[in-house]
Amino acid sequence: MTAPVLAVDDLHVAFRTRRGPARVVNGLSFELHPGRTLAVVGESGSGKSVSSLALLGLLPGTADVRGSATFDGAELIGRSEEELRKVRGAGIGMVFQDPMTSLNPVLTVERQIGEALRAHEKVSDDGVRSRAAELLTEVGIPDAKARLRAYPHQLSGGMRQRVMIAIALAGNPKVLVADEATTALDVTVQAQILELIERLQDEHGMGVVWITHDLGVVAGIADHVVVMYAGRCVEEGAVDELFGRPAHPYTRGLLGALPVVDDPRPARAREELTTMPGLPPDPVELPPGCAFHPRCPVRADARCATEPPPLAPVPGSAVAHRAASFYADSAAPADGGDAR
Amino acid sequence: MSDVLVRASGLRVHFGDVRAVDGVDLEIRRGETLGLVGESGCGKSTLGNALLRLVEPTDGTVEFDGADVTAAGRRGLRELRRRTAMIFQDPYASLDPRRTVAESIGEPLAIHKLHRGRAARRARVGELMEVVGLDPRLGGRYPHEFSGGQRQRVGIARALAGEPDFVVCDEPIASLDVSVQAQVVNLLVRLQREFGLTYLFVSHDLAAVRQVADRVAVMYLGRVVELGAGTSVSSAPAHPYTEALVSAVPVPEPERERSRRRIVLTGDVPSPADPPSGCRFRTRCPKVFEPCPDHDPVLQPTGPEQAAACHLHGVTDR
């Protein structure tokens, strides 16, 4: 196997708060290989976005970041702002959830793509214009030359996200980090953006880190999946393995909580969706032991409450598949939910 | 007693040039859940508001339990307000931050003069909190002290306070996490069965709609383009827009999701201030043909319990 283009090892992020440190990321590790798609899945507060911001040095000064993240073998954590700026864009492009807040409302599309282009190389005004138009065409914006003069508010949500992707592509990145990049979009627009990113990935061989709460999207695009809970990876594996034989009680709960659009049964003939009682823990007061144990439907015994379960291979799995639970069991029948 | 509880006929709601709802005929049957799906700006929330007369229709009528609410006077409106309720997307924005949740839940009781007397009202509020799965002892707390899911339960308790017959749920789970969404969906279904409620479940999430709705109406650019049993709308869509919508909703099963054929629509939704002539979907429709630009299709039967506004099932004109 090739060397990973991005490797995160034992990443920790804590924010200093008046109530004490909020431990948002607690020992996260993953590897992304060129041309592959890694999905990082979790609910609000699971630490999925903070970890990607940490490796790009985009967190505020109240954040303490420990651990390692290497891009093409070079360490990112602890690098100066200037060094990181070179990596961002040229090495790693980012697309965020809400293009309206990430784009500058008073600058034209051309200026904003131009800024990204000039950050990486010396280019003339004419060069910027033609390259920017090329990028817009590449992300599927029709009539690119005219659109260069548009301001963000003159574009639809889907178009704005395409502009964000064009900016992310300006430096020919080896890695694209998409943080809830389709969450604010309608499903038919999401389908357009997913198709676009898949095409760009094929053409440029980029590795993609796809951060999302949407397991349906993950099922369609990911090669490998990391499920996060309370700042830790609680389960990871190849996409078919993880969805087909989920082992961690949290992953099983998440999958059971999802309705399936083409389930043939009428609403009244369906079982209730699987629910997990309670809420994710407060990062200032993480429970000892397994952070999921207070909500765990499978088992919560003395060991769960005292000893954090290590991320260990799931028994009986032929492919790479690990879970952090003393009661990881991919063979147990799926708890409730739909025909799965 | 007619089995139709709510009926909209020729309903239009225009905001200046914007034709948010532009000629909708719809019936909601007693005790059913009608799902209303569509994407941003299709007019689904405006339609829900118009059915409760929270916005004034520009044209057409809404009947509630046989009475024309578009013509209702003060008294008729008061009756409508008690018998109907709304659950909003963002319970944080719809609850008064300066009132305790018990005060918010009890407000409809005061307005409609139900359960009079402090003790009776307090008991009723406690009962409502229990019904939605909240500890009544938390009644003295303020909305910011609750999680998103708990706040949505407060919003549901408040909606149920007047013992309504008809509840419009407007994107009730859109701002919640997946595991909390499931809790709220299950709760809404349970409450419906327990109290015989009739729901209009407005959502952009077709999978969630399918989980709760007996019938589904699909909206595009101010019109209902397909209406039918939930099972037929998602497994055998009769309108090309519904087909694209269903195909775009990802299913959480990798092997199946990778092999599903996604119908990717080109372009953006046209402006509701200037909808295309003829069929409004024709500018993006993969199956567009000769009659589409000149004839504005009506909703016509395409099978048992299913209707679509599409010329593929025979050319019609409004």
Image: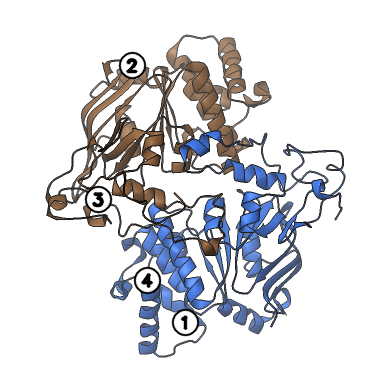
Q: Which chain has been coloured blue in this picture?
A: B
Residue A339 in the image: state x and y as whole percent. Answer: 47, 52
Q: Are marks 1 and 3 in contact (CB under 8 Å)?
A: no
Residue A73 badge: none
Residue drawn where x is 82% and y is 47% of the image: B311
In the displayed structure, would residue B220 be above or below residue A79? below
Name the chain under label 2.
A
Query: Considering depth in this image, is A323 or B1 the residue closer to the camera?
Result: A323
- Say which element carries label 1: helix
- First of labels 4, 1 by sequence position: 4
Are both tags, 4 and 3, on one chain? no
Residue at the spot of label 1: B109
Residue A292 badge: 3
Distance of label 4 from label 1 (alpha carbons): 14 Å
Query: Considering depth in this image, is B272 or A108 the residue closer to the camera?
Result: B272
Residue at the spot of label 4: B101
Q: Amino acid at mark 2?
A: Met
Name the chain under label 1.
B
Tell whether B209 sits left or right of B98. Answer: right
Are both tags, 1 and 2, on one chain? no
Name the chain under label 3.
A
